[in-house]
Image (tube, helix red, strand yellow):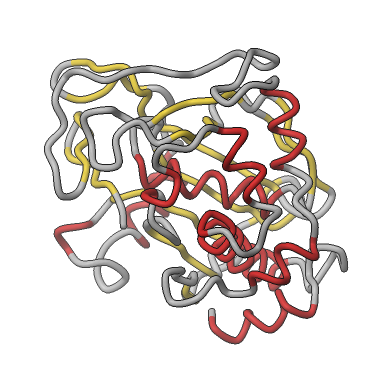
Amino acid sequence: MRARLGGLAAFAVLMSLSVTTASASAAAGSASAAGGSTSSVISTLTSVPVSATDAVGDGGSQVSAPRSIPGTPLTARGKPEMLYIGAEYCPFCGFERWAMIVALSRFGTFSGLTESRSSTSDVYPGTPTWTFYGSTFSSRYITFEPVELYSDTPSAGGFKPLQALTRPQQALFKKWDGPPYVPAEDAESFPFIDFGNKYLAIGSGGSPGVLHGLSWAQIAADLSRPSTKVARAVDGTANYLTAALCKLTHDAPARACTRVVRSLQGKI
């Protein structure tokens, strides 16, 4: 489950993008679609109880795990680096951001997250999500480097460019996001996550369809309810992302690298 990057324009798998879309980014503190402030939703999202995520475990067959790659260590500012490459219009990135925020919040603190929606002319139209553009992440364990290549604003048959890759990031993107790790026709697709050049996740760990028709507040609340389809998909994906990160940090901190999370490391 991924979107492809082609030339200067970005295209989604399974469906061509038109030049119309709806931007739903919201400033921090604004009202969420289900009522309540963005800040309260973020607080719920970034504090999902370990008891809930541990109860979900691997999320079942609907969730896919990262894979090992034979890379040299990738670090930044003296810590293992997690590199994310995606786009605001991309529904698969939209799903993955929920899981990434749950996972990363176990290792540090976000600021500046804002609400966003995927393209309304793509598959899984208008998926409620977040954007990492303009956000920061602070952690004593890992360095998180997010790159949102395109916005959700239409431009010249695709979407307006938002951020550019550095040369080292572009080299990693070309090296790992192609054969033999993905089929040639899906090369340079996203979401793309490189965990310290040791583990790789390309495409969303679950389906954006589980978020359909829900508001940000409803999704955030469901993450603490292990029996919901949202929790199984998002928390299950987050547990696998956490397992990869825990392998980089040698299972620190203990609050993140629980027994359940450590049990998933053998599947990566």
User: Image check: 263 left or right of 12?
Assistant: right
120 or 191, which lies in front? 120
The image shows a total of numbered marks equal to 0
Question: Is residue 171 visible to us here?
Answer: no
* Figure quadrant of the N terminus: bottom left
The x and y percentages for residue 237 are 54, 62
User: Image check: 87 left or right of 17?
Assistant: right
The x and y percentages for residue 189 are 29, 50
Quadrant in the rendering for residue 246: bottom right
The x and y percentages for residue 31 are 63, 15
The structure residue drawn at horizontal position 67% and vertical position 43%, both measured from the top left corner, is 221
Q: Tell me if residue 64 comes above or below residue 2 in the rendering.
A: below
The structure residue drawn at horizontal position 78% and vertical position 39%, both measured from the top left corner, is 109
70 or 182, which lies in front? 182
201 or 116, which lies in front? 116
User: Image check: 137 left or right of 150?
Assistant: right
The structure residue drawn at horizontal position 74% and vertical position 43%, both measured from the top left corner, is 46
Question: Is residue 172 visible to us here?
Answer: yes
Q: Tell me if residue 137 comes above or below residue 196 in the rendering.
A: above
75 or 233, which lies in front? 233
Q: Tell me if residue 152 comes above or below residue 139 in the rendering.
A: above
